[in-house]
Image (cartoon, rainbow, N blue to C red):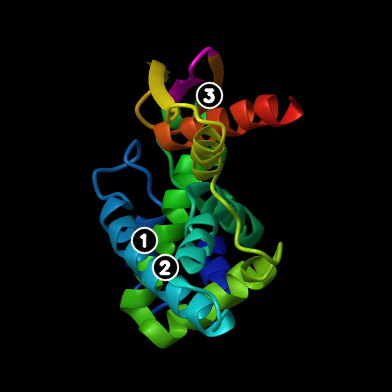
């Protein structure tokens, strides 16, 4: 048994019948046109369903808004990438030479997409019950970690602005750089004369970090 097949068997509890689907889930577009994107599209939706069901069962007294905050925090690219690293997926990602040299193998964007693609492949292989068990084991105590539903930094910043009578935050893309497989975005958030900038691997990530940075400024007084 190859290292990859042994890893798949250890990760999912048995060797997949269709190993080719999992090989594709681990293949970046820089390596082959037969890449993970279609499986990532499927896995993203499956993960959302499984996570929504899990939260619905775990927090029976919480309203939809609180559950949505929890869901959004648990299915981000950064969390999916963290889970992928813990499972050892990074060692099996297939990248083109340039992407490898650019460090795409440890990119949250790439690893997050790979994690969702693997979920998509496992869903096609074994069905929803098997995916449910896999996700709950892989995400572990993250669902209950932190107690109260987390507030997204952008929502927090908007609420702060409203509370002090300021206009809503405005987000501006300052710069986009880097290759397609490892882009970098610089975003500035502004509220009146207050502003902060942040860099991220996606525009959403940069906006979130910019909101965090401005929140830190305004809450320091």
The range drawn in magenta is 184-193
Q: Is residue 139 above or below residue 111?
A: below
Left of 114 or right of it: where is 194? right
Asked if disc 1 and disc 2 are in contact, CB closer than 8 Å, the reply is yes
Earlier in the chain: of badge 3 and badge 2, it is: 2
Asked if disc 1 and disc 3 are in contact, CB closer than 8 Å, the reply is no
**Point 44% across, 46% down: residue:** 94
**Point 46% across, 41% down: residue:** 109
The kind of secondary structure element at disc 3 is: strand
Residue ID for mark 1: 44
- Residue 185 on the magenta span: yes
The image quarter in which residue 117 lies: bottom left
**Point 29% across, 43% down: residue:** 32
- Residue 56 on the magenta span: no
The kind of secondary structure element at disc 1 is: helix
Q: Residues within 10 Å of mark 3 (few under 14, many from 20)?
A: many
């Amino acid at each position: 048994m190859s290292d990859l097949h042994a890893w798949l068997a250890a990760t999912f509890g048995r060797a997949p019948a269709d190993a080719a689907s999992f090989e594709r889930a681990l293949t970046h577009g820089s390596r082959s046109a037969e890449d993970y994107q279609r499986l990532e599209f499927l896995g993203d939706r499956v993960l959302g369903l499984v996570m929504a069901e899990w939260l619905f069962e775990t927090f029976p007294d919480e309203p939809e808004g609180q559950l949505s905050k929890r869901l959004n925090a648990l299915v981000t690219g950064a969390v999916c990438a963290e889970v992928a690293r813990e499972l050892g997926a990074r060692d099996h990602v297939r990248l083109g030479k340039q992407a490898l040299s650019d460090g795409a193998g440890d990119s949250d964007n790439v690893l997050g997409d790979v994690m969702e693609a693997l979920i998509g492949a496992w869903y096609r292989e074994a069905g929803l019950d098997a995916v449910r068990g896999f996700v709950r084991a892989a995400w572990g105590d993250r669902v209950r970690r932190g107690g109260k539903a987390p507030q997204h930094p952008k929502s927090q910043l908007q609420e702060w602005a409203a509370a002090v009578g300021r206009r809503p935050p405005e987000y501006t893309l300052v710069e986009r750089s880097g290759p397609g497989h490892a882009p970098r975005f610089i975003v500035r958030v502004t509220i009146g004369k207050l502003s902060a900038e942040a860099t991220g691997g996606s525009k959403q990530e940069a906006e979130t970090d910019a909101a965090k940075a401005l929140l830190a400024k305004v809450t320091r007084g």
